[in-house]
Image (cartoon, rainbow, N blue to C red):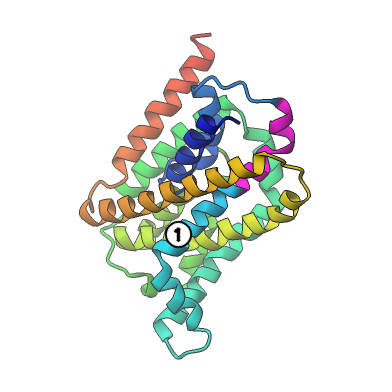
């Protein structure tokens, strides 16, 4: 990839990983939208390591943004901070379902659906998940610590929807959080905390492959992409926390409309304008 392509792809990745608009779908749709003819050799041997760098940048951004909270959560293993320890256990309960499902089904699902048409279709469906998920909820009143471990596991289970390109991990977990009674901002916060171990875990699994891949000069551009993706992700989570704090009634609606417009537009261009 060229430097310009790397910058564009990293910005899109950093934003779409945390906004409820499916980073996997945007990973498929970005080259299509910009009419990039990527080198087949790059796609076969280097694209996955390149994505690993971008995801690690996102994980670092989340750790930095929630650094104080993560410090308390980790320290709760050695202290009597019951509130932080409860959050740690809720994160574990929410991480296990998605991790298990991901290990078993990820390759099969992404191999079946990773193309432009299916990504656009499921992105369109993701819009309905966001819209009706928020519309059908009651007004949330819970903080994260008010969740039961069963409720945390249900929210975590919804993360597995992101294995299908087009469905958003953050959108699914936020929506499930609404259904479990979380306040808007608390649902976003729990979604971001759940994302951190999942993203880091996926990166760790791919790092050995990265080390065995002869990336050559691509290593430098991948590092640049990771930094840019991390900056975009940090700004994205800051915007999201502000947005959900001030828009309790219809926070998901703009993202639903975005998914409908982009999904329908790409789908129509694929089947009716070619």
Q: Residues within 10 Å of mark 1 (few under 14, many from 20)?
A: many
Q: Is residue 124 visible?
A: yes
> Which image quarter: residue 127?
top left
* Quadrant that contains the N terminus: top right
> Which image quarter: residue 147?
bottom left
Q: Which residue is mark 1?
A: 62
Question: Which portion, as a residue range, is magenta?
Answer: 40-52
Label the magenta part by its dominant secondary structure.
helix
Residue at x 28% of width, y 57% of height:
138
Residue at x 41% of width, y 45% of height:
20
Residue at x 50% of width, y 49% of height:
227
**47 within the magenta span:** yes
Question: What is the x, y in percent for residue 246?
Answer: 21, 54
Question: What is the x, y in percent for residue 251?
Answer: 28, 47
Compared with 14, 9 (above or below) is above
Q: Is residue 158 visible?
A: no
- Judging depth in this view, the residue of 30 and 272 nearest the camera is 30
Q: Secondary structure at mark 1?
A: helix
Is 3 on the left or on the right of 208, as rendered? left
Compared with 244, 140 (above or below) is below
Compared with 273, 113 (above or below) is below
Q: How many marks?
A: 1
Question: What is the x, y in percent for residue 249?
Answer: 22, 50
Is 240 on the left or on the right of 272, as rendered? left
Q: Residue furthest top?
A: 274
**146 within the magenta span:** no
Is 221 on the left or on the right of 232, as rendered? right
- Judging depth in this view, the residue of 9 and 103 nearest the camera is 9
Question: What is the x, y in percent for residue 89?
Answer: 51, 76
């Amino acid at each position: 990839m060229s430097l310009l392509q790397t910058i564009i792809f990293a910005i899109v990745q950093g934003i779409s990983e945390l906004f409820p608009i499916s980073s996997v779908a945007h990973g498929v749709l970005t080259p299509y939208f910009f009419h990039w003819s990527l080198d087949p050799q790059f796609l076969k041997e280097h694209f996955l390591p390149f994505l690993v760098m971008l995801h690690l940048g996102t994980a670092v951004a989340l750790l930095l943004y929630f650094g104080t909270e993560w410090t308390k959560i980790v320290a709760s293993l050695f202290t009597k901070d019951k509130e932080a320890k409860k959050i740690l256990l809720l994160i574990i309960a929410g991480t296990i379902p998605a991790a298990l499902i991901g290990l078993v089904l990820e390759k099969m699902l992404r191999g079946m659906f990773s193309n432009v048409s299916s990504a656009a279709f499921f992105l369109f469906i993701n819009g309905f998940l966001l819209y009706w998920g928020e519309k059908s909820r009651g007004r949330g009143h819970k903080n994260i610590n008010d969740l039961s471990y069963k409720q945390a596991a249900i929210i975590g289970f919804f993360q597995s929807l992101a294995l299908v390109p087009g469905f958003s991990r953050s959108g699914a977990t936020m929506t499930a959080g609404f259904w479990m009674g979380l306040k808007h901002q608390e649902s976003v916060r729990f979604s971001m905390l759940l994302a951190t171990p999942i993203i880091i875990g996926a990166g760790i699994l791919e790092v050995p492959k990265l080390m065995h891949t002869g990336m050559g000069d691509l290593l430098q551009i991948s590092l640049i992409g990771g930094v840019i993706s991390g900056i975009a992700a940090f700004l994205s989570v800051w915007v999201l926390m502000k947005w959900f704090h001030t828009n309790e009634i219809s926070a998901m609606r703009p993202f639903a409309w975005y998914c409908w417009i982009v999904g329908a537009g790409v789908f129509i261009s694929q089947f009716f304008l070619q």
